Amino acid sequence: FHLVLLAENLTGWKNLLKLSSDSYIQGFYYRPRMDRSTLEQWGDGLIAINGHLGSSIAHHLTRYVQSHDEKNYQAALDEARWHAQVFKPNEKGEPRFYLELQRHGIPEQDAINPLIQKMAGELGLPLVADNDAHFLLADDHDSHDTLICISMGKTKDVENRLHYSPELYVKDPGQMAELFPDVPEAIENTLKIADRCDV
């Protein structure tokens, strides 16, 4: 599962280096990874963001949307509670765990966004708005699509191949604000997080 980790201070930076090294040395299995005990051990000084559709929380929420089985929603709540406990507020009382909202036209993400907002209210967790970026400018989508075809050994006329949303570019603050007019605090939190990261 995905989890965004940002170093808030020098302690966080050192812990991020430890986590990264450990994920290659101890946790490598096809790709570097870390487990809960490692995060518990080296989580100080880090800000965590739940990591969009690739996160454990999103995994359970997606299953809930598909099945309407309440145990999946409860599993997502449990995941959020665990993250909030490991990444509890810093000594100033500032949050270190955020629930992530994204709006770039991916139906699965759009389906779970209301549930993420509901969870944030239920658990008293802050929201943060972000946007996956696979290419820099909107005009770069076609070039990125060409690279995807090359890497997969496909041609652009093949319909049943990996396609990325054209919205996965680096958006400016105005564009992001337009995407989240109903949750301005999620936009404000991006700046608060950036201002706190001092390494």
Image (cartoon, rainbow, N blue to C red):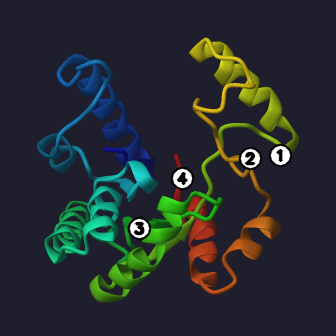
What residue is shown at x 43% (from left), y 53% (from top)?
A: 53
Which three-letter amino acid code belongs to the residue tagged 1?
Ala
Gap in angstroms between the C-alphas marked 2 and 1? 7 Å
Does residue 182 appear left or right of residue 46 in this picture? right
Q: Are marks 1 and 3 in contact (CB under 8 Å)?
A: no
Which three-letter amino acid code belongs to the residue tagged 3?
Tyr
What residue did someone put label 1 on?
138
Q: Are marks 2 and 1 in contact (CB under 8 Å)?
A: yes
Query: Along the line of sight, which residue is nearer the eye, 139 or 177?
Result: 139
For the image shown, how many numbered marks are present on the structure? 4
Which three-letter amino acid code belongs to the residue tagged 4?
Asp
Mark closest to the chain's N terminus, 2 or 3: 3
Q: Quadrant of the N terminus?
A: top left
Gap in angstroms between the C-alphas marked 3 and 4? 18 Å
Q: In x, y percent, where is residue 22?
A: 24, 26
What residue did someone put label 2 on?
166
Query: Along the line of sight, which residue is nearer the eye, 54 or 40?
Result: 54
Query: Which mark is drawn over residue 73?
Result: none
User: For the residues carrying marks 2 and 3, which lies nearer the camera in this image?
Assistant: 2
Gap in angstroms between the C-alphas marked 2 and 3? 26 Å
Instruction: Give the crowd class for mark 2: few <14, some 14-19, many >=20 residues within 10 Å.
Output: some
The answer to which image quadrant residue 63 occupies is bottom left
User: For the residues carrying marks 1 and 4, which lies nearer the camera in this image?
Assistant: 1
What residue did someone put label 3 on?
98
Q: Disc 2 on helix, strand or loop?
A: loop
Gap in angstroms between the C-alphas marked 1 and 4? 30 Å
Q: Disc 4 on helix, strand or loop?
A: loop
